[in-house]
Image: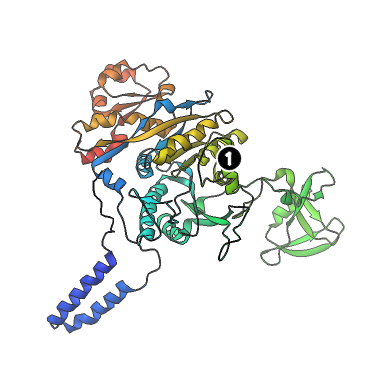
Amino acid sequence: MPATFNECPVQNERAEALAYVRTLMEQARKESKHEDLPKLEKLIALIDSKRYGLVWEEHVELVEEEMKSKIPVFVEDETRKIKENPASEDYNFLLEGDNLHSLHLLEKTHAGKIDVIYIDPPYNTGNKDFIYNDKIVDKNDGYSHSKWLSFMSKRLEIAQNLLSETGVIFISIDDNEQAQLKLLCDEIFGEGNFVTSIHWKRSESQNNNAKQLSIVGESILCYALNKFQNHFNKIELKESAIKEYRYVDDLTGRRFRRGTIVDNTRGKNLLHIKSPTGIERVIKSIRTKEFFKEKDKNGEIYWTKTGTPYLKIFLDKSEGQISNNWFDKDGVNEDAAEELSGLDIDFNFSKPKKLIMKLISLKSDKTSTILDFFAGSGTTGHAVAQLNKEDGGNRKYILCTNNENNICEEVTYQRLSNIQEDLPHNLKYFKTQFIEKEDEDLEYALLNNVKTLIELEHAIDLEESDKAVAFTLSEIRELDLTGIKTVYVRRHSHALMEKEDRVRYEGIELVDVPEYYFAKEMKEAGL
């Protein structure tokens, strides 16, 4: 890590462009090229004009500088491995280290594979919540917003690459950076992929000593990778919604509510109908003639005494209701504090488990992979485990956090360990370490760190799976292939395999590494 670091941003490109055009104007005057002056003045006006969007000074992080000379890798802390669910071969992961390094490695294993991302980043309040390049960013820092935006942009750009085709990201934020974050996300994910801003009631109490308004809510921005190829799951019917099913079918006794058939505003179809009592009329409807006839034949039309038809929507066929973006009964900060206290965990500013469960439920299925790269107290992991218990799912989580003040070891990991009795599941704990790019034996150094990436990509423990590694020719020949379907090999060793070796490996997939994970790094090193 460099001993010194320039905290100033790179030169503002706009200012640089303006200065350059002004030198051209000065030169044009000296050379009496008066015909060029109006053109240059127009160019200045264009450069200097107000622009819609977000512009900020770029900053470089120390953790970025570190990757110029070093390659991050994961090393397992086997003392923290948890295997409390022997019935499952799947593992969840806790990644200790700067999340930019973790995200860099996740790009190698999970590009296009993450279904739901939830993050609760620092809010940049100036109250020691945001540390940039080992320094607390306070309210008086002239680059407070730009440092935060630089910090977030690098991580969100990778997050966008990690999302699956139907993936979404939820980002908790308060008023300090909400507006800036919205514009940043519009740029990274695309304005058209903005789903909504969820408004969450974070507290049941309010500050009556507030000088303006008491703030009891926060925002959760939601973006999809592709909004128009996306859908959200319905939520369980609330009691108020169930009460709407107040009608009872005469023949079956099934409860139902009325659905619209007649629609004079949107209806494009003219239907000639006749009620059971003989009332005939012509109605406008969004429903087709064929649809109406089929439903009427099956007894799924409710007729009023005046001959108005309604669709019977049965309670026992309901898949739930569409969620709205106002979350006022989904856990508050006081609940989060109680949850941690019950687990004997000392930590502030955690989100309630109920809130994260609802967000995950809106988009995940039972096999989804959920990522949180600002893991904090580990609420997301807890929420995933709880959901799996409630619906029999097999969702998997990946959590990333640094170990500042031992948070990863003593808070995040401890919470995931403490819930095992009630929510047994499997967990691997990886730490970030580094390999020097100038390492004389770089390829072998990378090979020694491929195992963790294989495990991370497939959510497995190699020793318990149908996958194996064999990097030397002797390892290839000595490997027990019983139950093995995939073997990761060194490309050079793969090329040296003889006919007998290939016969032995017939039907087994051979994957060349480390190029599979470290192609860029290998190319840069000339390997």
Q: How is the image coloured?
A: rainbow
Amino acid under disc 1: Glu
Q: Is residue 467 above or below residue 404?
A: above
Q: Locate the C terminus by quadrant.
A: top left
Task: Residue 331: give x, y in percent of width and height.
Answer: 61, 47
Q: Is residue 317 above or below residue 471?
A: below
Query: What's the residue at 24%, 79% (across, down)?
Result: 39
Indicate left or right for 504 with 240 as reference: left
Task: Residue 479: give x, y in percent of width and height.
Answer: 33, 17
In this view of the protein, which residue sits in the foreground, 155 or 131? 131
Query: What's the residue at 51%, 39% (across, down)?
Result: 346
Task: Residue 440: give x, y in percent of width and height.
Answer: 18, 32
Indicate left or right for 187 with 379 as reference: left
Q: Which residue is the site of mark 1?
A: 339
Q: Locate the N terminus by quadrant.
A: top left
Could you tell me how many numbered marks the image carries?
1
Indicate left or right for 268 with 501 as reference: right
